[in-house]
Image (cartoon, grey):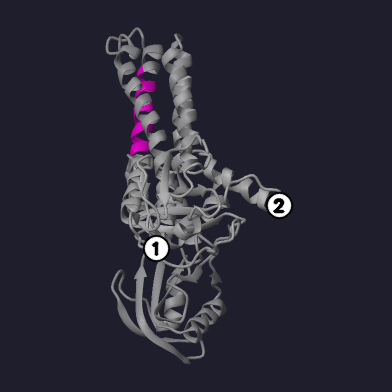
Amino acid sequence: MTQGTIFALSSGQVPAGIAVIRVSGPATAAALTALVGGVPSARTASLRKIRSRNGDLLDEGLVLYFSAPNSFTGEDCAELQVHGSRAVVNAIGQSLLKLGLRQAEAGEFSRRAFENGRLDLVEVEGLADLVSAETEMQRKLALQIGFGVVSQRYTGWADRLTYARAMIEAELDFADEEDAPSSAMDLVSVDLEVLASEMAQAARATASAEIIRNGFKVAIIGAPNAGKSSLMNAMAERDVAIVTDIAGTTRDVLSVDLDMEGYLIRLYDTAGIRDADDIVEREGIRRARNAAANADLVLHLTALDSLAERYEDIAVPTLRIGTKADLFQAAADFYLCISCVTLAGLDELREVIVSHARSAAVNADLGGKERHITYISSASKFLQDALEEPRLELKADALRAAGNELGRITGRVDVEDLLDVIFSKFCIGK
């Protein structure tokens, strides 16, 4: 990525009440001098008139200056808090371009923070999650990752591996010295066993964290006219799916994202499952079964006047839900009976869905990102090799390899090929 001094609109899209233009790089102070007549005291907001190189007044706003290395990027930085009109932002941007600055690329501010040691890769990923968080649970998880809690765990693991390796190498190199440990593995093997258990737990927790981050998937399946689309609309409190008395109205998988008690619930409405001759309907039924197979929870709907309907056996937690309870008598062999007309049972159904989501996301606050699982699994394998290997020199090599795998998570070791992928997911200005 090209260096130099960069700038970008870091606040929301204009027009807005206020726009924040962020600047970072070695020419920051010179740019401020040209625009506002000088460099304000570091970390102190200063009200200044902002002018072009020709002296034309562009706007008046607050200017903040952060000197390196005490800034987000670790470089000299500035923020111009100006009126949020498109004309003002464009005029200031043009002035910065004429001063030799350039527009930042996606994620470039965060990448500079990483390259200057202000953030590690795990904290960068947490920051990206925080910017895109839509639910309360996503916000809490992003804070755990972005504010160093998860990084501290990975760093602590690496330190313990380094200590164990040091003990083994001391036994190899200084076996004749009086202060050398008599049996390195006796000293470290118990902690390494505990460490292996912690890594396994973290891998499970990361899978739970992905449910919070990407959503808990709930598929609604059943025969035609079982009330699937009606339930989708009732849960979303708006018309997402077309509802008619004609069997087979829904041909494709429809989805809607819902925030339920801070959890992102992804609800899928599917085509009615039956024996069909129409090629389009058969494809819809195939997609319905596929959506169910990939869901975290399945709601199998059956109209209470159609109790002879064949039940779909799916290898996913499934709740049998009776529908049209406003028209027909509830039956005891259903988990819950509901009506999308009177809304009876829908509050209970929401509670059940949230309960399953909460159970699926247990210990998610201990988890990282899906990418981390790959390196944790690899580190765990090397750690197990170290525990089973009888030769001390090979134990030490296995522990070194395990430490390197953990280092790739935080960005300490050989991650250049990951950087473009990670930072490209950021918005401009971050």
Name the residue at 38% across, 16% down. Answer: 168
Between 263 and 199, the one lying in front of the other is: 263
The magenta segment: 153-167
Q: Is residue 156 magenta?
A: yes
Query: Compared with residue 16, is residue 342 higher up or lower down, i.e. above or below?
Result: above
Rendered location of residue 376, percent (x, y): 45, 32
Name the residue at 41% across, 16% down. Answer: 387
Q: Which mark is residue 341?
A: 1
The kind of secondary structure element at disc 1 is loop
Q: Is residue 339 left or right of residue 222?
A: left
Rendered location of residue 332, percent (x, y): 35, 41
Q: Name the residue under label 2.
A: 278
Query: Compared with residue 105, is residue 352 higher up or lower down, i.e. above or below?
Result: above
Disc 2 packing (10 Å; few <14; some 14–19; many ≥20): few
Rendered location of residue 393, percent (x, y): 46, 14
Q: Which amino acid does label 1 sit on?
A: Val
Q: Is the magenta stretch mostly helix, strand or loop?
A: helix
* Quadrant for the N terminus in the image: bottom right
Precedes in sequence: disc 1 or disc 2: 2
Specify whether residue 18 is in view.
yes
